[in-house]
Amino acid sequence: MDRETELFYRQIPKVELHAHLNGSVGFTTMNKLIARKPHLNIESSRTAIHNGQRRTLDECFQVFKVIHQLVDSEEDILMVAKSVIEEFAADGVKYLELRSTPREETKTGLSKRRYIETVLEAIHQCKQDEVDIDVRFLVAVDRRNGPEVAMETVKLAEDFMLSSDGVVVGLDLSGDPTVGHGKDFLPALQRAKNCGLKLALHMSEVPSQKAESELLLDLPPDRIGHGTFLHPEAGGTDILVDKVCKLNIPLELCLTSNVKGQTVPSYEKHHFQYWYECKHPSVLCTDDKGVFCTNLSREYSLAASTFGLTREAVWSLSQQAIQCSFAPEAVKQKLEQRWAELRPHIL
Ligand code: 6MZ
């Protein structure tokens, strides 16, 4: 890619809606964490999947376990969250919805409440430092921890939704998709929805989740993460696609993550094409920019080169993402205005 093209993707304003905090930690910050904890004896090759490398999804989840060992105190979380926000801003992201699973760490005295407060503190500090990005937070439920923990997390998210001045906007359901069944999480998800939290649910990330996806779609969620196996060509069903289309539920699509995690065989075969051709609201996202060694401008550029998108089409994708966000209407309007101001003359 020539320099001018690279600059184009970096400079266009972008919206990031699917970014897991601990999966998004950049190389420099990760090395700082590794240096801070020499006793763990962790090599940086264990915290990222470099270009040209692939892992099974199961191996990807092992990477998160390693990162969690490195990020286990208030101090770590503050550093990690600030650096992730700054890196997204440097990549031209103007609106970011960050998600993370609150963790309790007895060793460092970290509680789940304090975990969320620390992420919110990082968001606040970035705002005070005038980093040019609007950041919101989705509290994540890791399916591996089961329905009871999910309910506790929802209650915590509810509290923060009321006290965070609009920063906590939603709930994410994520974690290893081969563990547990979505039906067990319905009471917690329903409660979250009833209290006004928006739902961003990982769905059909692996082929075995058809029945689960049907159930979850009845909630319905406000956005779908991945949705790799929803459509019939990938082994999904017309019923699933019809529901998603009728309800107009936006999809968060993460090209590099899915290729490196081997849930799709290649960029060319990514389901972005299916949904884009249906003109269904689809948002390009990074998922875990640290682990998968990517950034959002790279994902836009990969989508453009793989699927032959013009710059005008790329611009529309980035602009349409505003309406898929969980930002209040007034914020969406402001973002639309900024996009109008920042539209490159060459388009
Ligand atoms: C499902 C994923 C994921 O929460 O500690 N996570 N869940 N599918 C994926 N596709 C690759 N990537 C990340 O960030 C790490 C956590 O995010 C979820 C997993 O639960 C992982 O442990 P936080 O900030």
Image (cartoon, helix red, strand yellow):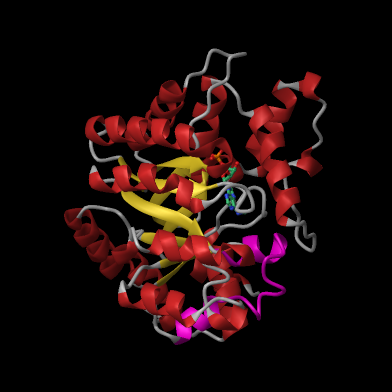
The residue under the point 27% across, 67% down is 341
Q: Is residue 179 above or below residue 329?
A: above
Tell me which corner region of the image, top left, top right, bottom left or bottom right, holds residue 333: bottom left
The residue under the point 54% across, 43% down is 143
Task: State the quadrant of the C terminus.
Answer: bottom left
The residue under the point 51% across, 68% down is 9
Q: How far across and down, in percent of the image, does residue 321 sit?
A: 36, 66
State the residue lying farthest toward the left: 330
Q: Can residue 226 be seen in this view?
A: no
Q: How far across and down, in percent of the image, does residue 297 sit?
A: 53, 64
Question: Considering depth in this image, is 14 or 224 the residue closer to the camera?
Answer: 224
| Residues shaded magenta | 254-277
Q: Is residue 310 above or below residue 39?
A: below
Question: Considering depth in this image, is 127 or 185 the residue closer to the camera?
Answer: 185
Residue 32: in magenta span: no
Question: Considering depth in this image, is 201 or 301 the residue closer to the camera?
Answer: 201
